[in-house]
Amino acid sequence: MALELGADVVIQSSDENLRDKITKSAEAIDAIVETTASADGFNLAMSAIRKGGSLVLVGGYHKALEVNLSRIVGSEIRVTGSSCYGYSGMKRDF
């Protein structure tokens, strides 16, 4: 769906060479939607996003993470949380 909506590249976490694909694309990645809610996923996203890029956190983070905020500040990365999953009665929201 992301490709249909205009994304140039979509990299799924199930790709065998995930780290290689991300690091090769790191200079061009404008936006990342991080859905794993893991420290590894967050840190990988932070290392891959370009200066001035946007990182959206969708996963349900339930543990505290140790984060190097200098990458966010120094590269002017926008980090946004999104609570987009939920149920309203019997209707599922997204």
Image: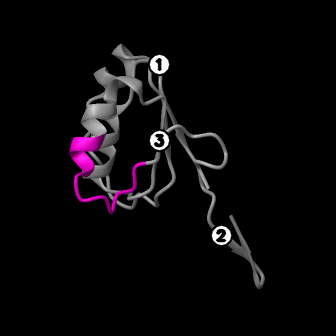
Pointer 3: residues within 10 angstroms few (<14), some, or many (20+)?
A: few
Q: Which residue is mark 3?
A: 9
Q: Tell me what residue is drawn at x 30 percent, y 58 percent.
A: 15
Colour setting: one colour
Q: Position of residue 26 (x, y in %)?
A: 32, 29
Front in this rendered view, residue 78 or 19: 19
| Residue at image point 27% right, 33% down | 24
Residue 23 on the magenta span: no
Quarter of the image where one finds residue 27: top left
- Tell which tag, 1 or 2, sits nearer the viewer: 1
Relative to residue 15, is residue 68 depicted above or below? above
Marks 2/3: CA–CA distance: 28 Å
Give the Cα separation between the discs numbered 3 and 1.
Answer: 18 Å
Q: Quadrant of the C terminus?
A: bottom right
Look at discs 3 and 1 and give the one toward the viewer. Answer: 3
State the residue position of label 1: 52
Residue 23 horizontal/vertical position (percent): 25, 35
Q: Amino acid at mark 2?
A: Gly
Would you name the residue on which mark 2 appears? Answer: 86
